[in-house]
Image (spheres, coloured by chain):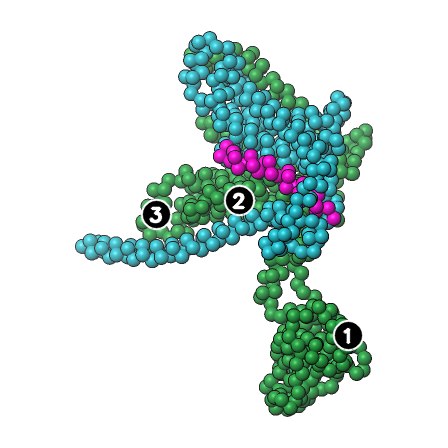
Chain colours: A green, B cyan
């Protein structure tokens, strides 16, 4: 080959020297990577014991067994969602950081999860996704937002006394109605129990609404209160000075099955249903008053588990995409962007027509890198999904480990899954080789 | 004539747009700032949560959210950490170091030698072999778990630290060779030829000319592999037995009782990420360079 390379190669060392330099690497690559591929192909054709030849039987079970079909379905969800979201977020962040002075700090913050092990990231997100809004920050934020936008807080557990003297009765459907129908100009009392007095200890005392002082002729007044005195005492079904009003309870006046007026109780538990024509009304507290409060989402339950883990994955990888795309962006000629802006193009047009097309090669590399990475996703699923929902969150790489080492004890199946995984990344092998060949030219 | 008349009008429109545009930019800039601050907070909060949880005792963690520490900083304690450090966890910390440091050094050394051959020594089939290395870049680790476990069993090294190190070195090589070879080919030919003219043996050119010049690439590779090996769970899970397990595997074995042993998991996870984080901040420039040089793994 010396003739082929011309005079320059004259000075080069002998090819045998190359062997010495390459020997350790080729030995390791040969034994740890090439040999396993060949071994796995053969092993995948045998059963769990490794003695009985089953042909393509293991591959057949990959596509018929419902457990592995779930892993394939999950991997498809992963491949469709995660790389796209990561690339798009990376692009958005990369473009936007060009407009701020603290871009370096921002990039470091987003990039930081790259240094963190996926195990630690998994522990981090197990904490984030805790069900109890007093522990998991995700549900804490959700419930806070929910409670800000939905009026009133509920009083789960509150109910009337269950005896004939009580003015209010709990119905089958969870609503509470006043036993005696009321007419406009009257006042009703709705004493409730079933709440710990401490839960409303900061509320103002309840006020009884007497017909004498100010229930309008077209209104029904009344009080909803917790008919329990802290430490005992007080008269049942009467508003005692120590007793607390229940604020924010929805009250309805119903006649002929139709709601004629709706209001909410004030801080002292009083309410006035106004604008009622004469007649007989049932005063009703809808069931929503007694519904359990919104407690956030079951992130780690069977339905949300895969989206939840993908969320953690995006947290880990968005910074990677951003840094790569930002590097590509810095290579985009500023003149082209400026020229377009001077010509009157809006920022969106500049972004859509110039920046994105110029970045296309980088975006493709980021996207492909993410697809390869997502196909092999293991740690995050293994750590974040609690044992009981792991079947629903399972992915091929995890199933491969589980079936061959984590109790499954079927290395024939494990080898088949490993080969399946390898086949899935072959297109990207070819992509890499093509890209390299083109770059070399 | 019409074109001449049109020109000043267009210019005026341009200036108007400029004013409006600048105003829009100002508002838009504010929105961008706020948005990015929110994103940054979003990215910081989970890790901050881990740190705070790791510094509260069990009672506090079970009764209230970690964010209450903003109003009640008194709940912060180092008890979890001192408990952890007096438990068996420290041995897994040493195992992580005993695995990561040799693996990183071996990868750098072996890959540098191979990359030198690919870049600067002519030999038949060089391109084909290098394309094979590129093909190996994306081979999933899963493919080797079963065969290598069997092989380690035959040689009686299954479960040892050496077995884990060798596995990491092998699977780190394609990327390492790729990265270094691409850097080495960029070294000016004249430097090498001058050394060769002087009759320097090839290993000395490698050690005294090429390797020192490649310091930035070696630094990139070093930080990359260090993080890769330090953070690995899967390889350790399969090949390291209990007495040789690194932190990741030690912590994984605690995951089953997640609810009840946050006081072990949280400080353990934080300890496992603090060294990579410090290194990352110290060498982030090289880390980014490494990413840019070969983003295909």
Q: How far separated are the C-alphas under marks 1 and 2?
A: 57 Å
- Toward the viewer: A441 or B294? B294
User: Does B261 appear in magenta?
Assistant: yes
Q: Give the residue number, with chain letter if any, for mark 3.
A: A340
User: Does A157 appear in magenta?
Assistant: no
* Badge 2 vs badge 3, beta-carbon distance below 8 Å: no
Residue A251 x/y as whole percent:
65, 78
Q: Give the residue number, with chain letter if any, for mark 2.
A: A110
User: In which quarter of the view is residue B186 placed?
Assistant: top left
Locate the C terminus of chain B and report the quarter of the image it occupies.
top right
Please give the chain letter of the residue carrying mark 2: A
Locate the N terminus of chain B and report the quarter of the image it occupies.
bottom left
Q: Are marks 2 and 3 on the same chain?
A: yes
Element under disc 2: helix
Count residues near mark 1 (Cα–Cα under 10 Å), then give few for <14, some for 14-19, many for 20+: few
Residue A178 x/y as whole percent:
72, 82
What span is in magenta? B260-286
**Earlier along the polypeptide chain: callout 3 or callout 1?**
1
Residue A182 as seen in the image, left or right of residue B117: right
Tell me: residue A223, above or below residue B11: below
| Labels 3, 1: front one | 1
Q: Give the residue number, with chain letter if any, for mark 1.
A: A232
Q: Main secondary structure of the magenta part?
A: helix
């Amino acid at each position: 080959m010396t003739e082929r390379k011309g005079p320059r190669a004259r000075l080069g060392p002998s090819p045998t020297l190359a062997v010495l330099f390459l020997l350790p690497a080729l030995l390791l690559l040969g034994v740890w990577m090439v040999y396993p591929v060949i071994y796995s192909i053969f092993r995948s054709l045998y059963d769990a014991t490794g003695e009985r030849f089953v042909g393509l039987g293991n591959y057949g079970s990959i596509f018929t067994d419902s457990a592995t079909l779930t892993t394939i379905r999950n991997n498809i969800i992963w491949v469709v969602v995660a790389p796209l979201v990561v690339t798009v977020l990376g692009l958005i962040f990369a473009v936007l950081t060009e407009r701020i002075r603290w871009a370096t700090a921002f990039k470091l913050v987003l990039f930081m999860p790259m240094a963190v092990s996926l195990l630690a990231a998994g522990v981090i997100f197990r904490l984030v996704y805790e069900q109890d809004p007093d522990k998991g920050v995700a549900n804490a934020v959700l419930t806070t937002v929910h409670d800000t936008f939905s009026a009133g807080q509920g009083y789960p557990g509150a109910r009337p006394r269950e005896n004939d003297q009580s003015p209010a009765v709990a119905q089958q459907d969870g609503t509470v109605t006043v036993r005696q129908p009321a007419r406009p100009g009257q006042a009703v009392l709705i004493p409730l129990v079933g709440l710990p007095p401490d839960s409303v200890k900061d509320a103002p005392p309840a006020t009884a609404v007497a017909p004498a002082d100010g229930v309008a002729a077209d209104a029904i007044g009344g009080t909803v209160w917790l008919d329990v005195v802290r430490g005992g005492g007080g008269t049942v079904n009467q508003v005692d000075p120590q007793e607390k009003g229940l604020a924010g309870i929805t009250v309805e006046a119903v006649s002929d099955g139709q709601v004629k007026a709706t209001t909410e109780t004030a801080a002292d538990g009083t309410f006035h249903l106004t604008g009622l024509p004469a007649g007989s009304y049932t005063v009703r507290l809808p069931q929503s008053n007694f519904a359990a409060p919104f407690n956030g989402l079951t992130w780690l339950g069977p339905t949300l588990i895969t989206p939840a883990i993908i969320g953690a994955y995006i947290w880990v990888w968005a910074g990677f995409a951003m840094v790569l795309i930002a590097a590509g962006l810095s290579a985009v000629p500023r003149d082209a962007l400026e020229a377009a802006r001077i010509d009157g193009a809006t920022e969106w047009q500049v972004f859509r027509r110039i920046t994105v097309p110029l970045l296309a090669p980088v975006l493709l590399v980021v996207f492909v890198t993410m697809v390869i990475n997502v196909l092999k996703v293991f740690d995050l699923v293994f750590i974040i999904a609690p044992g009981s929902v792991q079947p629903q969150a399972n992915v091929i790489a995890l199933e491969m480990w589980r079936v061959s080492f984590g109790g499954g004890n079927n290395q024939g199946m494990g080898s088949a899954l490993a080969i399946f995984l390898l086949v899935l990344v072959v297109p990207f092998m070819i992509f890499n080789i093509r890209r390299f060949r083109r770059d070399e030219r | 004539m019409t074109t001449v008349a049109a020109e000043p009008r267009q210019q005026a429109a341009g200036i108007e747009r400029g004013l409006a545009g600048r105003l829009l930019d100002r508002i838009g800039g504010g929105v961008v700032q706020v948005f990015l601050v929110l994103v940054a907070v979003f990215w910081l909060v989970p890790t901050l949560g881990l740190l705070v949880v790791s510094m509260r005792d069990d009672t506090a963690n079970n009764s209230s959210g970690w964010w209450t520490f903003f109003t009640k900083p008194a709940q912060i304690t180092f008890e979890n950490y001192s408990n952890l450090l007096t438990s068996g966890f420290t041995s897994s910390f040493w195992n992580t170091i005993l695995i990561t440091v040799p693996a990183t050094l071996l990868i750098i050394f072996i890959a540098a030698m191979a990359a030198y051959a690919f870049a600067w020594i002519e030999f038949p089939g060089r391109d084909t072999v290098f394309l094979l290395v590129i093909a190996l870049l994306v081979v999933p680790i899963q493919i080797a778990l079963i065969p290598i476990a069997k092989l380690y069993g035959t040689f009686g090294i299954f479960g040892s630290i050496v077995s884990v190190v060798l596995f990491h070195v092998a699977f780190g090589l394609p990327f390492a060779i790729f990265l270094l070879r691409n850097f080495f080919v960029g070294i000016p030919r004249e430097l090498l030829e001058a050394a060769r003219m002087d009759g320097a043996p090839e290993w000395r050119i490698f050690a005294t000319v090429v390797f020192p010049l490649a310091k930035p690439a070696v630094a990139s590779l070093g930080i990359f592999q260090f993080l890769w090996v330090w953070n690995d769970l899967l390889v350790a899970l399969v090949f390291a037995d209990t007495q040789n397990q690194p932190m990741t595997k030690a912590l994984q074995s605690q995951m089953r009782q997640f609810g009840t042993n946050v006081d072990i998991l949280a400080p353990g996870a934080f300890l496992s990420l603090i060294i990579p984080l410090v290194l990352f901040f110290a060498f982030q420039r090289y880390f980014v360079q490494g990413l840019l040089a070969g983003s295909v793994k």
